[in-house]
Image (cartoon, helix red, strand yellow):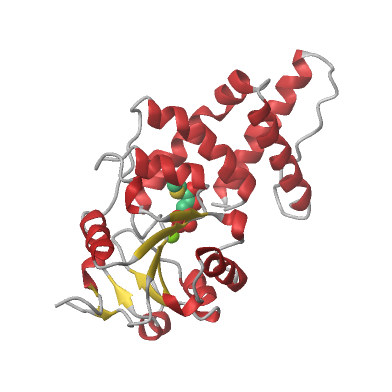
């Protein structure tokens, strides 16, 4: 087994979700289809609620920022012109969400709506969060060794809490010291990692970030975090240069903590 020796200065392990703790197939075959199939019905059922209107406003603002992108679907303002107009706006939101998802965009607006939609699906037992089998035992071991463990995902903090709160392993939220999403900044920007360390109250070099995406690893490393790239079944392939540059792990069991015997 290949071993990644965690540097002694590391006190915090920061984890990505999709492709790191959780199979990409779970996200692509369970989480995302639920959104595609249910977004229209969800919007019709919740349209009058403040939370839903806030989600729509954020998506509208994002569509304005995206106006130069190919295929973007603008979301018109509702002027109070009756049910037909509401249906047209809902259809625009549905088309915008489908368009963003076809590109696997990680905008805060899309992720916020998705988090709100998954709430009902988890609470009714329709979905349960899934993890690679090494994940939960390893996190328990790290915590016993005194490590703090945080999540940083493009999925909204609410969506993260649902995934870990309603999972095949039960409610395992207690295993995490905190959660970050794109509200702190995008995962491919190094400033986001500086903000995370500052919010935790440590230096960036006290943090080890585990992710499947090399652009994220690169941004974290630029901020002076330690990184290892996680290679899991179903993840995107790495180039030869990436394979030789990054420390790679295929299981959390390959992390060797300084206190391990
Ligand atoms: C609860 S996370 C849902 C998955 C998701 O929406 C996503 O975009 C995953 O991105 P990650 O940053 O975890 O790779
Ligand atoms: Mg990922």
Q: Report which quarter residue 177 is drawn in.
A: bottom left
Q: Nearer the viewer, residue 151 or 117?
A: 151
Is residue 131 at all visible to an observer of this figure? yes
Q: Report which quarter residue 168 is drawn in.
A: top left
Would you place residue 65 above or below residue 235 in this image? above
Q: Position of residue 101 (x, y in %)?
A: 56, 45
Q: Position of residue 67 (x, y in %)?
A: 78, 50
Would you place residue 193 above or below residue 173 in this image? below
Is residue 251 at all visible to an observer of this figure? no
Q: Is residue 215 left or right of residue 55?
A: left
Residue furthest left as drawn: 261
Would you place residue 189 above or below residue 110 in this image? below
Residue furthest top as drawn: 82
Would you place residue 63 above or below residue 233 in this image? above
Q: Nearer the viewer, residue 26 or 70?
A: 26
Q: Position of residue 142 (x, y in %)?
A: 26, 65
Residue drawn 27% across and 59% down? 139
Quadrant where the C terminus is found in the figure: bottom left
Q: Position of residue 123 (x, y in %)?
A: 39, 28
Residue drawn 50% across and 76% down? 204
Residue drawn 54% across and 54% down? 181
Residue drawn 45% across and 54% down? 178
Q: Is residue 22 left or right of residue 82?
A: left
Q: How many marks?
A: 0
Quadrant where the N terminus is found in the figure: bottom left
Q: Nearer the viewer, residue 110 or 54?
A: 54
Q: Nearer the viewer, residue 5 or 121?
A: 5
């Amino acid at each position: 087994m290949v071993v990644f020796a965690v540097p002694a200065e590391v006190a915090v392990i920061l984890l990505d979700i999709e492709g790191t703790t959780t199979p990409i197939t779970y996200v692509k075959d369970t989480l995302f289809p639920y959104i595609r199939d249910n977004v229209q019905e969800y919007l019709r059922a919740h349209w009058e609620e403040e939370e839903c209107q806030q989600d729509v406003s954020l998506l509208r603002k994002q569509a304005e920022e995206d106006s130069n992108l190919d295929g973007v679907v603008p979301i018109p303002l509702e002027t109070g012109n009756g049910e037909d107009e509401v249906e047209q706006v809902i259809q625009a939101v549905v088309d915008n969400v489908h368009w963003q998802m076809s590109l696997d965009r990680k905008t805060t607006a899309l992720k916020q709506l998705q988090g709100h939609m998954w709430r009902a699906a988890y609470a009714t037992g329709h979905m349960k969060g899934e993890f690679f089998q090494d994940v939960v035992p390893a996190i328990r071991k790290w915590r016993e060794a005194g490590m703090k463990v945080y999540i940083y995902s493009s999925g909204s903090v609410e969506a993260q809490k649902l995934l870990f709160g309603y999972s095949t392993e039960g409610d395992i939220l207690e295993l995490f010291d905190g959660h970050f999403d794109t509200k702190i900044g995008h995962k491919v920007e190094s400033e986001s990692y500086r903000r995370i360390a500052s919010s935790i109250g440590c230096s960036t070099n006290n943090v080890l970030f585990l992710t499947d995406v090399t652009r994220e690893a690169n941004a974290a490393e630029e901020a002076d975090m330690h990184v290892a790239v996680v290679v899991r079944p179903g993840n995107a392939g790495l180039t030869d240069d990436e394979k030789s540059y990054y420390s790679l792990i295929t299981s959390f069991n390959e992390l060797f903590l300084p206190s391990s015997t």
